[in-house]
Amino acid sequence: MRDDLAQGEPSAAPGAVASVAAGAGERTIVVPRFALPEARMRSWGLAVSRPVYGFAALATLLAGCLAVVVFAAAGPTVLVPSSSYAFPGWVAGPLGGIFGRLISSPQTLNYGFSALLLAMTLAYGIALASVRMLSMRTIVITILALHAVLLLSPPLQLTDLFNYLGYSRLGALHDLNPYTHVIGNVPHDPIYGLTSWHNMPSPYGPAFTLLTYSVAHLSLPVAYWVLKTATVLASLGFIALVWRCARQLGHDPRFAVLFVAANPIFLIYELGGFHNDVFMLVPAMASISLLLAGRDRRSGAALMLAVAVKFTMVLLLPFLLLAARPSRRRVRFLTGAALAVVPLAVASVAAFGFSIPNVSDQSTILTPFSGPNLVGLLLGFGGGAPTLLRIANVVAVVAVAILVAAVARGRGGDWISAAGFATLALLASLAWLMPWYVVWVLPLAAIGASIRLRRAAIAFTVFLVLSFMPATGTLLAALHLRPMGSAVGQAANARSHRLEQ
């Protein structure tokens, strides 16, 4: 295998050698912790020994992102929801208007965007299959180019970036607690028309909210570009930590980095939408890296910072505690966590009193293809009824407990993969499922030992692409299928509408 690795790349992890598929007799191409049957790859028409397919896949991803950015920046379109209210030059970015007004038909854009997502998903699969033929230099250059292109984009598909700025201005400029007040309390603020959740207190963690306060006193265009740039830089930091964790575990970092950074959902929805999950994932992955390096106190502190950005990352806590062995390491980890909690809690109370992020509203509204809604439709409940949502939460907690217990008994595989499966259980239970949430599980699947988890993460990516691409809604409407058409769905839509108005 070493002869097949690109020149100058690190050798594979110990024990990662060419093997023979049991009972199949197929020679396999092995990237550490990930094997693909060569005969199957050739049956798909891919000569895996040739790097041209990997280069073509990366070029497709880059061209796809560039195409989306160009069309999004050209003028008000369905690609940028806030553009229906206003689309100033500082939102459009430097590419705005350069190519003139391109396609403005919503239907044409929706079909084109859907086709592009499918093409990028196929390119993602080919890139992963060809990763052995790609050098780390090629991968890094591609990732930097993707980030540079997407930095030029207006926020794609949703308005969350403007919501971040709205809550920061609510607190820092208008002296209103974003956990007890809403953006609708300041309709005269110029950010108001660009935001969506006008009647919902902030659901974002105190650490992230305080971070956004730092840009609230800047002019709106400057604050917008500072937060966009910070998001892109945080994304690069997150990917660098994925690389570091893979190296620490003895895995080939090329696969781990591509698994995360070339994912089309990550590129278009997370990075292109400038969502704040990367601010959570930087300290979360730092916590894992620090634990692997034996820096247990710092690991505990980093995890608490991740939780303060977004409470979701508390899910990592039991698995990190199990990994911190022997018990004296566990004590050091908890000491670091406790020392970090104190200043974080003091800062939160000083800024927001004893109010906490508003996660209850989002937990009661539905997206059409969330797990509870689909299960509810299949069982004849009309979708994600409140009782079913409570059951889904209980099932998720039980699943996490089972995984924790299995790892504690030494029967649950590696703790990183178990944490990944726990994250998938959480995602399956969410009533409010958004496509970029897949980024919560991608790094764990990338650096963990479980091939099943990687397959599940890829399958979930495909599901999200098919569920959220605009053509799916058009097709379902033509077939008279309405996932939100029941009384349960209409009630959820009504709650969402009240929060937006």
Image (tube, rainbow, N blue to C red):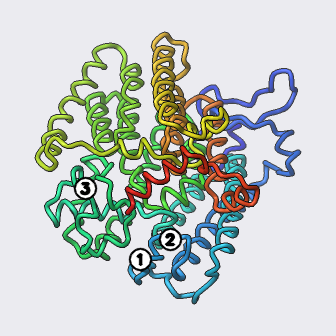
Position of 105 compared to 356: left or right? Answer: right
Q: Are there few (<14), some (14-19), or many (20+) residues within 10 Å of tag 1? A: many
**Three-letter amino acid code of the residue under disc 1:** Val
**Three-letter amino acid code of the residue under disc 2:** Val
The N terminus - image quarter: top right
Of tags 1 and 2, the one toward the viewer is 2
Of tags 1 and 3, the one toward the viewer is 1
**What's the residue at 30%, 30% (across, down)?**
295
Residue highlighted by disc 3: 211
N-terminal of the pair, mark 1 or mark 2, is 2
Mark on residue 91?
1
126 lies above or below 68: above
Looking at the picture, tell me which residue is in the foreground, 468 or 23: 468
N-terminal of the pair, mark 1 or mark 3, is 1
Residue 397 appears in which quarter of the rendering? top left
Residue 55 appears in which quarter of the rendering? bottom right
Percent x, y for residue 285? 41, 40
Residue highlighted by disc 2: 80
29 lies above or below 116: above
Label 3 element class: helix
Q: Are marks 2 and 3 in contact (CB under 8 Å)?
A: no
Looking at the picture, tell me which residue is in the foreground, 198 or 29: 198
Q: Is residue 55 visible?
A: no
Q: Are marks 1 and 2 in contact (CB under 8 Å)?
A: yes
Percent x, y for residue 372? 56, 37
State how far apart marks 1 and 3 are (Cα). 21 Å
Label 1 element class: helix
Residue 309 appears in which quarter of the rendering? top left
